[in-house]
Amino acid sequence: MYRSLKKSLAATVAGLSLLTLSACSTADKASNDTVNVGILQYMEHDSLSVAREGFVAELEENGYKDGEKITIDYQNSQGDQANLQTISEQLVGKNQLVLAIATPAAQSLATASMDVPILFTAVTDPVSADLVDSFENPGGNLTGTSDQAPIDKQVELLGQAVPDAKTVGILYTTSERNSEVQVEEASKLLEKAGYTVVLKGISTTNDVQDAATSLMKDVDAVFVPTDNTVASTMTMIGELSIEYKVPVIGGSTDMVDAGGLLTYGTNYEALGRQTAKMAIKIIEGEEVSTLSVQAPETVDLHVNTEMAGKLGIDVSHLSVSN
């Protein structure tokens, strides 16, 4: 009887093992049919959110709808460095592809994995941020799209809009590498154009009001790069711009809408879509290391006409040279 029971138990275990293997096989197949895509957005502001929305919309329009061919895991670190690292490790641990929105998010994900394909967008200079070796040959598991707008065109437009300006202030976050790169370039171009440049660095959003107020008392115009911290406070900066009658040249179209006067800047919705096209290539089998970093394909002359009216500035004649 004991031997019979033992045989019966062995048969039962074998049957359960086969069922388990079958279930695992089915689960693996289902898993293989759906690609898990993580998205890490550095903080909440219009440019970054619009880039994310463009990315998701482009994927969906090409047959990769969330919940069908792909599953999207969206996380926002709210600008918190501790959250950033924790979320990065979680995302690379459970997704086959991850999108980083903004330089700090990309840097955090880069330290979290050297294997999982990582795309980035809204990153100004991925080379100086140590994300890639070069635009042409990224050299690792990261590539994506830069949001670097032509600052020389922005300086040109500043001269047209405010022809009597002599002193230009630059407001930026000292801890954001993407901002430092733009500040260096803008300073050179502004000084070459004959302006006196005044730099004002901040650390957090709590510094913005005092820094912007101090700056606007001493300058004729303010330039703000595509700086994440500054961008999140553009409504406040716009109010100060009106109070002191000092126009703000924004780094992006969304910053201008929120409180700036004008820019020749990146369209972030289009940039997100551009990045999604790269994501589709990776999902469909291309190696991330073979995809070069791309510059923005859509750059627009963007004017806040309501702000122009409040500042008493004529913007009807603005144009960008080729």
Image (spheres, helix red, strand yellow):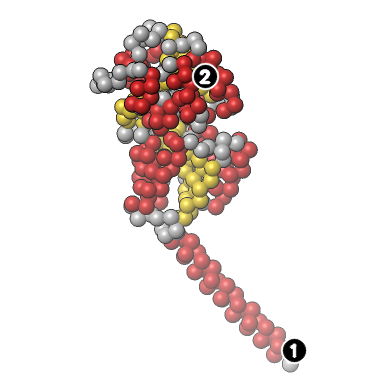
Q: Amino acid at mark 2?
A: Ala
Q: Is residue 217 above or below residue 23?
A: above
Looking at the figure, which quarter contains the N terminus?
bottom right
For residue 205, which numbered disc appears in the image?
none
- Residue sitting at x 55%, y 48%: 91
Please name the amino acid that badge 1 sits on: Tyr
Task: From the top left corner, tell me how far across and down residue 263 is, in percent.
Answer: 36, 25
Residue 276 percent across, percent down from the top left: 38, 45
Which comes before the other along the chain, label 1 or label 2?
1
Q: Quadrant of residue 151?
A: top left
Q: Nearer the viewer, residue 132 or 105?
A: 105
Residue 212 has which mark? 2
Residue 57 vertical placement versus 23 (above, below): above
Q: Position of residue 269 (x, y in %)?
A: 37, 39
In this view of the protein, which residue sits in the foreground, 178 or 220? 220
Is residue 91 rendered to the left or right of residue 263? right
Q: Position of residue 150 (x, y in %)?
A: 35, 23
Residue mark closest to the camera, 1 vs 2: 2
Whole-angstrom CA distance, mark 1 to mark 2, is 86 Å
- Residue at (70%, 85%) from the top-left corner? 6
Q: Is residue 110 visible?
A: no
The residue at 40%/12% (across/down) is: 190
Residue designated by label 1: 2
Outermost residue on the right side: it is 2
The total number of labels drawn is 2
Mark 2 secondary-structure assignment = helix
Which quarter of the rendering shows the C terminus? top left
Q: Quadrant of residue 201?
A: top right
Label 1: element kind: helix
Q: What is the crowding at mark 2: few (fewer than 14 residues within 10 Å), some, or many (at least 20)? A: many
